Image (cartoon, rainbow, N blue to C red):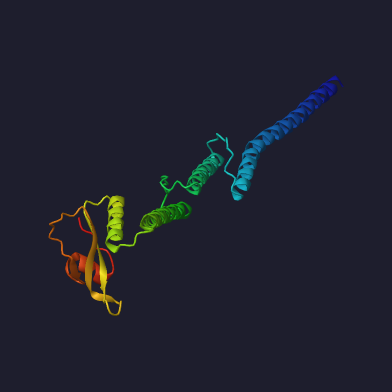
């Protein structure tokens, strides 16, 4: 009888210990699973929020994930996207404010967004230069018109105009020819150009007073109706 109770007590304690170990293992496994789950789900929540912000063009946020697993690699890719977006945003603002000399570098030949921004910058720079050139030309023409008001003598007016043009373009010499008119019909001649004004020319200069269209550089300009630039 004593042996029976002793064996029963041993079996009871063994079963009790086994049950307690099972409960402890279950609790420990649950805690470990929570830790692992939190370690995985928390970075994914951060990346999800970041993706939502990037989708609406918001690059003003940071991602701080220091893991070295696949999630860490994914976070690094997100950080690169954010940094690239910030650079494009900064470049766009500079271009919008009129800075067309800002340096923009594409990350690869497939970086369509950056390449398109570079092309837009170059087109705006060219357009801006052309606009400034037109404004400058119109300003100088307006200035010459203002200076010529009240001048009745053709030679005096021509000398005033060519002198102003020479000063504006920093020329060392200048001459102004106009087409001659038939005194009877008052119609311009297509063949003869008459010198009406000059700048920095000598009194005994060998410059011709009349030139036929197509004769020399001056005559060729009149014939082609476009400038000829020499150096």
**Quadrant housing residue 228:** bottom left
Q: Quadrant of the N terminus?
A: top right
Which residue, as the protein is rendered here, is positioned at the far right? 1
Residue 109 showing in the rendered view: no
Q: Nearer the viewer, residue 111 or 41?
A: 111
Reply above or below: 71 against 27: below
Q: Position of residue 117 (x, y in %)?
A: 46, 52
Which residue appears farthest toward the top when viewing the image? Answer: 2
Residue 25 on image: x %, y % = 71, 31
| Viewer-side residue, 53 vs 97 | 97
What's the residue at 27%, 50% (across, down)?
170
Q: State whether residue 67 appears in this view.
A: yes
**Residue 85 point in image, percent of width and height:** 52, 45
Please indicate whether residue 151 sits to the left or right of residue 39 in the image.
left
Image location (x, y in percent) of residue 43: 62, 39
Residue 151 location, quadrant: bottom left
Residue situated in front as seen by the camera: 46 or 170:
170
Number of disc labels: 0
Q: Quadrant of the C terminus?
A: bottom left
165 left or right of 207 in image = right
**81 in relation to 7, above or below:** below
Residue at 79% across, 27% down:
16
Residue at 31%, 51% in the rendered image = 168
Q: What residue appears at the point 55 percent right and 41 percent down from the top-left corner?
A: 75
Seen in the picture, residue 137 relative to 215 is either above or below; the reply is: above
Please indicate whether residue 101 sits to the left or right of residue 225 in the image: right
């Amino acid at each position: 009888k004593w042996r029976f109770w002793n064996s029963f007590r041993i079996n009871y304690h063994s079963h009790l210990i086994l049950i307690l170990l099972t409960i402890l293992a279950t609790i420990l496994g649950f805690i470990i699973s929570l830790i692992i789950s939190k370690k995985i789900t928390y970075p994914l929540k951060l990346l999800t929020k970041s993706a939502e912000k990037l989708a609406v063009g918001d690059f003003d946020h940071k991602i701080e994930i220091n893991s070295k697993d696949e999630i860490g690699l994914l976070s690094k890719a997100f950080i690169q996207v954010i940094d690239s977006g910030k650079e494009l945003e900064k470049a766009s603002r500079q271009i919008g404010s009129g800075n067309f000399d800002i340096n923009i570098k594409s990350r690869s030949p497939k970086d369509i967004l950056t390449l398109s921004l570079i092309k837009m910058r170059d087109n705006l720079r060219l357009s801006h230069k052309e606009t400034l050139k037109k404004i400058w030309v119109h300003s100088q023409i307006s200035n010459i018109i203002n200076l010529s008001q009240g001048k009745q003598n053709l030679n005096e007016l021509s000398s005033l105009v060519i002198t102003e043009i020479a000063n504006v373009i920093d020329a060392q010499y200048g001459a102004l020819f106009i087409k001659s008119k038939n005194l009877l019909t008052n119609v311009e001649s297509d063949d003869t150009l008459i010198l009406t004004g000059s700048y920095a020319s000598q009194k005994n200069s060998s410059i011709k007073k009349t030139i036929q269209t197509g004769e020399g550089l001056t005559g060729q300009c009149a014939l082609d109706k476009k400038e000829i630039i020499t150096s």
